[in-house]
Image (spheres, grey):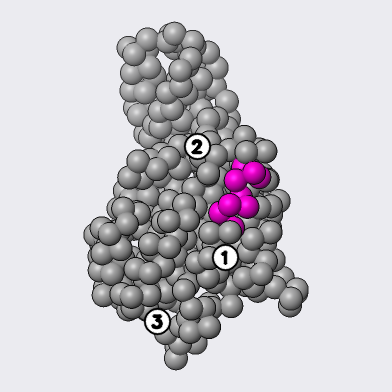
Amino acid sequence: MIVIMKQGATEVQIANVTARIEQLGCRVHLSEGKERTIIGIIGNGRPIDREQIELMDGVERTVRILRPFKLASRDFHPLDTVFAINGIQIGSRQLVVMAGPCAVESRAQLLETAHAVKEAGAHVLRGGAFKPRTSPYSFQGLGEEGLKLLAQAREETGLPIVTEVLDPQQVPLVATYADILQIGARNMQNYALLHAVGEAQRPVLLKRGMMSTIEELLMAAEYILSHGNERIILCERGIRTFEQYTRNTLDISAVPLIKQLSHLPVIVDPSHGTGKWELVEPVSRAAVAVGADGLIIEVHPHPEEALSDGAQSLKPERFATLMQSLRPVAAAVGRTL
C-alpha cells in the first residue's frame, strides 16, 4: 500500500504518518517529488486499516498495490529511477552503453579493448573475471587477477566497470573492485546472492534469466530493493525458445512493458540476445527505438581467438560504426548518446 500525501504536506505531517506506520510493525519507503510525497508501506503480513491512515493530517488518500512486486512497481514509485555512477546518469535522457570483452583474458586484450570502446563513446567497461560456463572444462575466468586488470583499465580510461559476481561469498571481493555488480542470467533467482548484493549497497545490473518471466525478473529485483538498495539496472538479454538460428530470442517487447510496470532503468544485451555479431547492430537500434535506457555489448579485438563468446563479439571498428549508427535513432526518440 502507498500513502499519497497532500500537495504541500509539512515535514511534521509526513513524520507523523511515518511514525504511525512504523508503530504498526511495517517499514516505510519515502518517495519525495517536487509536488507531493508518497509513502510506501512495506507490510508484515497483517492488515492495515486504511481509514485510520487516511484520517491523519496531510494525507490525501491511500492506494493498494496489487502486484506482487511492490518496491519495483511504478504504482509505488511513479517517477523513473535515475542515479549516477561516477558522474554517469543511469535512466536519464542519455543512453548508457556498456562495452568490453565477455571475459578478461589478458592485460593486453583488456586494455586494447578498453581504450577502443572509450574512444568510440562507451560509458562503462564490461568484462568477466568470474565466468559461469556450461562446461566445467571451459575457461572460467582469471578470478581476482581479472578484477585487478579491470581496475587498471578503469584507472587508464576513466571508465567505471561492471563485472559479474557468482555467489554471496564473492560479493565483498568483487565490490572492492567493481562499480556495478552484475547478476547473470543463470543467477537471477539465486536468492542468497540477491540478498548479498542488496546488502552491499552497490549498483546492480540484474539480467533476466534465460527461462524467466518478466514478473520473475521484477520479483528478483524486489529482493535487492528490500534491502534499501535502489540502484538497480534491469537487463533484457533474450530468453530460450525453440528457435535455432539465434542463441536466444530477444524479447524486444519486454523493454516498453517493463517500463510500464516498473520505475527501474532497463538496458538490452543484443550480444547474448542474438549470439551473432552480424545481428548486434540492427537489434541495438531496435532496442533504442523501443525505449531502452542503454545497451551492454561484447567487444573483442580478435573474436576468432576469444576464450568465450567470440561469435557474438564485435571488433572495435564495428563497435565504433555501431555507435555512430545509434545516434540518429536516439535523436529520433528524444534521447542522446
Residue 57's x, y, as percent? 43, 9
Q: Which residue is mark 1?
A: 318
Closer to the observer: label 2 or label 3?
2
- Magenta-tinted stretch: 322-330
First in residue order: circle 1 vs circle 2: 2
Residue drawn at x 43%, y 51% is 123
Q: Judging from the image, what secondary structure is the residue with disc 2 in?
A: loop
Q: Which residue is mark 2?
A: 92
- Above/below status of 18 relative to 164: above
Q: Residue type at mark 1?
A: Arg
Residue 125's x, y, as percent? 40, 59
Residue drawn at x 51%, y 40% is 94
Residue 87's x, y, as percent? 35, 41
Q: Is residue 75 visible?
A: yes
- Above/below status of 264 relative to 278: above
Disc number for residue 252? none
Residue drawn at x 38%, y 69% is 112
Q: Which residue is mark 3?
A: 140
Q: CA distance from mark 3 to mark 1?
A: 27 Å
Q: Residue type at mark 2?
A: Ser
Foreground pick, 216 / 326: 326
Closer to the observer: label 3 or label 1?
1
